[in-house]
Amino acid sequence: MGLRGTGSHHISIENAFVADHVLTLGPGELSVNAPLYRHPAHLIALGHGAVHIGIAQVAIEDLIGEGDAAVAAHEPLAADALAAVPPCRLGDLVFVPHPATRFVRSDYPALTIFAANRSEDPPHPIKATEPEDALITRPGMEVIVCYLSPDAAEFLVALISGDPLGVAAARAIEASPSFDIAANVAGLIEAGVFSAITLGDA
């Protein structure tokens, strides 16, 4: 069965004999004498390529639409949400990631390359072998892309994986003894990384 979007009418036949001359590709007599089929093969391919581009565009629009619905259905965690938590229970806090939150870990400087391509400044050399971690959030429908230091990346990965704050902090401090827990928690909340908090087992 053909595709309605392209107006094609292809069919599939099983257990049928097909003569060799029907399968011949290349110069030969026209079997369909119409303007479209008089063009070189690569021009026909360009025409069909437009169909695939259109399919990809619709897929992207659908994906964005689903993301918009998920974002709209979940408010980012309020900045004062931790105020009501007893200090003795802060280490048991479990942060619920916002549906729009994404963590990107790359063996290459992906964020630096991304930023360079969006900047109007003159290009500068980039160390292609330097790995980078990035945080992508979307509070209020605005996409935010942030670079994460190795200790901040360990902290975030632990939190969005469901580890309590105390465990995540220990991992970050192991990576960097000078890691600032309070500043990083505040920064992640401000970036809209989380949508809720719960208290884990004491």
Image (cartoon, grey):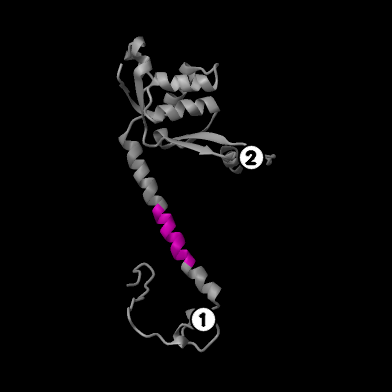
- Magenta extent: 49-59
How many labels sit on residues? 2
Quadrant occupied by the C terminus: top left
Between 83 and 148, the one nearer to me in the picture: 148
> Residue 138 appears at what percent x and percent y?
42, 35
Position of 143 with respect to 78 (left or right) is: right
Choose top left, top right, bottom left or bottom right for residue 8: bottom left
Q: Main secondary structure of the magenta part?
A: helix
Image height check: is 108 above or below 96? below
Point out the tag, 2 or 1, that comes first from the N-terminus.
Answer: 1
The N terminus lies in which quarter of the figure?
bottom left
Depth check: give the residue in front, 114 or 17: 17
Count neighbours of disc 1 (C-alpha within 10 A) and say few if under 14, some if 14 to 19, many if 20 or more: few
Type of residue at label 1?
Answer: Leu
- Furthest toward the bottom, the residue is 29
* Residue 88 at x, y percent in the picture: 35, 10
Element class at badge 1: loop
Q: Relative to 111, is 79 on the left or the right?
A: left
Residue 4 percent across, percent down from the top left: 34, 69
Q: Nearer the viewer, residue 142 or 32?
A: 32
Can you tell which mark lies on residue 129?
2
Q: Secondary structure at mark 2?
A: loop
- In the picture shown, does residue 147 fall above or below 10? above
- Circles 2 and 1: CB atoms closer than 8 Å: no
Q: What residue sits 56% from the left and 38% below the top?
A: 111
Residue 186 seen in the figure:
no
